[in-house]
Image (tube, rainbow, N blue to C red):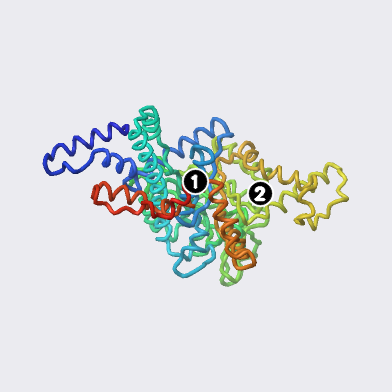
Amino acid sequence: MTYMHTIAEAGQSIGRFPGTWDAIEPAAVARMRLQNRFRTGLDIARHTAAILRRDMAAYDADPANYTQSLGCWHGFIGQQKLISIKKHFGTTRGRYLYLSGWMIAALRSEFGPLPDQSMHEKTSVPALIAELYTFLKQADARELGMMFREADAAQAAGDEIRAAKIGHAIDNYETHVVPIIADIDAGFGNAEATYLLAKKMIEAGACALQIENQVSDEKQCGHQDGKVTVPHEDFLAKIRACRYAFMELGIDDGIIVARTDSLGAGLTKQIAFTREPGDLGDQYNGFLDCEAVEGAGRPGDVLINRDGVLMRPKRLPSNLYQFRPGTGEDRCVLDCITALQNGADLLWIETEKPHIAQIAGMVDRIRAVIPDAKLVYNNSPSFNWTLNFRCQVFDAWTAEGRDLAAYDRARLMSADYDETPLGIEADARIQSFQREASARAGIFHHLITLPTYHTAALSTDNLAREYFGEAGMLGYVKNVQRQEIRQGIACVKHQNMSGSDIGDDHKEYFAGEAALKAGGIHNTMNQFAA
């Protein structure tokens, strides 16, 4: 519905109450409706699920259409990302937000900073989803409000052409509300707990849930040691729980991202139930590190029958069982195939390094069974990207027989190598990593889990060094405010960003000439008009 149609509809509603609603302006109602397009989280989930499905189809047609996101731990951070994306690229297409369980644990828990072990309050996950969308909706309201003011100014100046252009822009406005891929960890409990939390996350607006195959109460960060996986049937039950949650709430095209941590997980808490040889339980148990036993074994032994031979799975003092070394990739492939065959839409393989050939090797095996398999990949800050890619180049050049006498492999992180041919080649490979990985390794979506955790620390460190040092106030003015002004950062007008002008508009709607507005001539934000 166009802006003018919305005004007309509002006018019809007001007209049904003559003499009592006369002070209500149809144009103001239309503006408020357009500024609040999404009434509920389910409206958002429905809208963003359609975006994600459209983008998945576009990627299937051409892997150059991969998508990207950055992790968020606060609504303001997510809002500024999308404002920046629209500013620099003119569209939000193909660009999402990621909600990281790691950042919630580290930054949003009432217990204080926690490791990524599912110890934080699970209700903080849907709360952050709702917060992110509150800020994104406010970004819409702010931007549309400025467009309405421009339209009013054009009308007041009698510039009908300018007013018509603004009206067209309002009718074709692109929202800041984009998909959020939301981390539900390992489900925070059993399948029923997963279902209940999934519903809360979807009701808050999530159209994509990322769930991993670790044991919920033993969950570890994907890039730490000590990870423990569950048998496939346990994981598939949680995938089904997420699907039921989506469908119960009417988001039939909701997206489930099935994450496998098997590459770095050498442990399991359970021996899988087996109905018959070759079933999923039998395949899972087949990866266990076992030794043959004589007779009935020792008292307290847990034994399995492997091809008619009694075997003792190696059991640790932690009461966990270990997998055979070197089986990680095989387990990842089986995890991915079975997840896609049982309701998942996208895959996430947690790796220990950003290596295209490693990822592509597993994806090729998955795609031999499921040709349209697609990945979400964690371009993690846990990787030392500089060192990893310099080592990759060093090793490749060594294999080619090139002269590497100028380089010490043990010192490749040194700034001495930044402008060398090796350092430049490594940076070029980092720059093209997402494009190459999407083309060769089936990666539909690239994300960085913890970027703003690191940018906040870096920028704060730089400000503290300058402001509390000899630069004093100049440390803030030169390196923050002056850069905001010159780079056109909207937050330099922080009153406007916080919603002050939106509030002034509402005051005028409600009180007319009697409105006490904050945006008058004495508002110091006017200093930034130039």
Q: CA distance from mark 1 to mark 2?
A: 45 Å
Nearer to me, 476 or 36: 476
**Label 1: element kind:** loop
The amino acid on which the numbered mark 1 sits, given as a three-letter code, is Ala
Q: Earlier in the sequence, mark 1 or mark 2?
A: 2
According to the picture, the residue beneath numbered tag 2 turns out to be 354
Q: Position of residue 122 (x, y in %)?
A: 42, 61
Residue found farthest to the front: 521
For label 1, the crowd category at 10 Å Cα-Cα, with few meaning under 14, some 14 to 19 and many 20 or more, is few
Q: Which mark is residue 343?
A: none
Q: In this view of the protein, can residue 65 be seen by the observer?
A: yes
Q: Is residue 322 left or right of residue 198?
A: right
Label 1 or label 2, whichever lies nearer to me, is: 1
| Residue 310 visible, this angle | no
Query: Residue at (45%, 46%) from the top-left corner?
Result: 208
**Residue projecting furthest to the top:** 161
Q: Position of residue 462 (x, y in %)?
A: 62, 61
The type of residue carrying mark 2 is Pro
Residue marked by disc 1: 530
Q: Say which quadrant the N terminus sits in.
A: top left
Determine the residue positioned at 49% across, 53% down. 77
Q: Secondary structure at mark 2?
A: loop
Task: Residue 15 in the image: state x and y as whole percent.
Answer: 15, 36
Image side of residue 427 versus residue 296, left or right:
right
Q: Nearer the viewer, residue 307 or 342?
A: 342
In this orientation, which residue lies closer to the viewer: 359 or 113?
113
Asked if labels 2 and 1 touch by Cβ distance under 8 angstroms, the answer is no
Q: Is residue 523 above or below residue 319?
A: above
Q: Residue at x 35, y 33 (%)?
A: 157
The structure residue drawn at horizontal position 65% and vertical position 41%, both measured from the top left corner, is 360
Furthest residue toward left: 19
